[in-house]
């Protein structure tokens, strides 16, 4: 009776052990054996060095249209995205007060002209009287007092003419100013372009007492745009005029746009204790996909080399766990006079090779002096060694991230 039960218990126990083993194999992560390494090949090919930055798209030339007179907006003839031509009327300020001012100053000007004519006539009469009394004085007909009175009236008339002339000039200036203000009440586009901003509505009062208010912003030509980027001081020395640029915008994530470095501004800008410099990138926008204000993720190509020997950047950050082995192996490579070091596998062990590096880009580093390193040879980029941390759990792989 007890024998079948014992066999049953043994079978259940065996099945339990098998299940535990299977679950342990599924749940527990794979732990690499000590001494395993991930390697990548030394390759030969093109290497591109770049500088990354972020900027904002804008029209090359943007004109802010304002008003030099105060008043109420009576009419608007354009709106957002309206194409405009130079001299085109785009807004009208109520001209009633300006017309009245023109009429008033015109009347004052004409009155000044009339006063000038009257003063000139009185001057001519005074001149004739003075000359006649001078002759009569010589003939002994009039007294000296009469002659003096006539000459005094002549000089007074002469002064009156000069005053009338100044009055004419003053009133003419006021009249001209009133006419100019009337012209300013009609807002015209200063150039060809597209309206990208309208800041007023019909019925709104604009005041030009202290500063000229902006009514419209006109982009002269959106087929040619520019990006204003900020480049870190560590990278600005690599940037040169006419270097090729690629960039993306969030609206077209799968499309790459191109431009050219057109300006490098030398004025430093301090932001969060970081010194940056403004770099302007010229961009063609013939299909008008790009719009002012878009954020551009810019990549400036600073240098390009063909057919160079290159290694992954990660291999320069790798160092083996066993420092004793490293020092022992380094003694065989003391003839090299470089500071950069990579490791290759020989008989399953990392062997250091001294190299001189150059251009960096695309996750690779140019090898100028290989120290015997050959194309297609494998360099170590990561050590997949099981290690324990302070609490007895397993840590991740040692070495730099792979590519």
Image: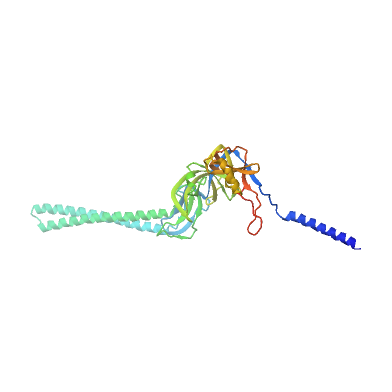
Say whether residue 255 is visible. Answer: no
- Residue 316 relative to residue 13: left or right: left
Residue at the (10%, 57%) spot, across then down: 144
Residue at the (9%, 52%) spot, across then down: 138
Direction top: furthest residue:
307
Residue 14 placement: quadrant: bottom right
Say whether residue 218 is visible. Answer: yes
Direction right: furthest residue:
1
Q: How is the image coloured?
A: rainbow
Q: 60 or 349: which is nearer to us?
A: 349
Direction bottom: furthest residue:
1
Does 16 appear above or below 376? below
Q: 76 or 127: which is nearer to us?
A: 76
Q: 304 or 283: which is nearer to us?
A: 304
Residue 325 lies, in percent from the top left, at: 60, 46
Q: How many marks?
A: 0
Residue 156 placement: quadrant: bottom left
Residue 372 lies, in percent from the top left, at: 58, 37
Residue at the (35%, 58%) spot, across then down: 104
Residue at the (56%, 37%) spot, across then down: 306
- Residue 122 relative to residue 23: left or right: left
**Quadrant of the drawing holding the N terminus:** bottom right
- Residue 247 relative to residue 98: left or right: right
Q: 365 or 18: which is nearer to us?
A: 18
Residue 143 lies, in percent from the top left, at: 9, 57
- Residue 126 relative to residue 223: left or right: left
Residue 17 lies, in percent from the top left, at: 79, 57
């Amino acid at each position: 009776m007890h024998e079948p039960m014992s066999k049953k218990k043994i079978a259940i126990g065996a099945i339990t052990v098998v299940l535990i083993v299977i679950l342990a194999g599924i749940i527990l992560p794979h732990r690499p054996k000590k001494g395993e390494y991930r390697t990548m090949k030394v390759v030969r090919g093109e290497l591109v060095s770049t500088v990354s930055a972020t900027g904002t798209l804008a029209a090359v030339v943007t004109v802010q249209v304002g008003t030099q007179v105060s008043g109420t907006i009576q009419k608007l003839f354009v709106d957002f995205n309206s194409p405009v031509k130079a001299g085109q009327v785009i807004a009208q300020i109520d001209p009633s007060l300006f017309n009245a001012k023109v009429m008033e100053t015109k009347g004052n000007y004409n009155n000044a002209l009339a006063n000038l004519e009257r003063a000139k006539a009185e001057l001519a009469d005074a001149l004739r009287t003075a000359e006649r009394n001078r002759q009569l004085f010589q003939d002994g007909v009039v007294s000296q007092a009469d002659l003096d009175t006539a000459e005094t009236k002549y000089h007074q008339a002469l002064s009156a003419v000069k005053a009338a002339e100044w009055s004419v000039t003053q009133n003419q200036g006021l009249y001209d100013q009133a006419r100019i203000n009337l012209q300013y009440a009609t807002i015209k586009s200063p150039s060809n372009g597209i309206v990208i901003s309208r800041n007023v509505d019909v019925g709104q009062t604009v005041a030009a007492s202290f500063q000229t208010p902006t009514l419209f912003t006109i982009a002269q030509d959106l087929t040619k745009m520019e990006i204003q980027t900020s480049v870190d001081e560590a990278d600005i020395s690599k940037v040169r005029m006419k270097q090729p640029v690629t960039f993306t915008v969030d609206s077209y994530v799968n499309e790459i746009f191109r431009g050219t470095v057109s300006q490098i501004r030398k004025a430093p800008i301090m932001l969060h204790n970081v010194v940056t410099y403004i770099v302007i990138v010229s961009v063609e926008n013939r299909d008008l996909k790009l719009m002012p204000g878009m954020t551009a993720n810019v990549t400036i190509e600073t240098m390009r080399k063909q057919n160079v020997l290159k290694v992954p950047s990660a291999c320069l950050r790798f160092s083996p766990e066993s420092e004793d082995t490293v020092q022992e192996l380094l003694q065989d490579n003391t003839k090299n006079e470089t500071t950069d070091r990579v490791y290759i596998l020989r008989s399953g062990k990392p062997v250091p090779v001294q190299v001189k590096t150059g251009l960096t880009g695309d996750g690779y580093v140019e090898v100028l002096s290989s120290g015997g390193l050959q194309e297609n040879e494998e360099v170590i980029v990561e050590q997949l060694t099981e290690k324990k941390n302070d609490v007895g759990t397993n840590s991740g792989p040692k070495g730099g991230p792979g590519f």
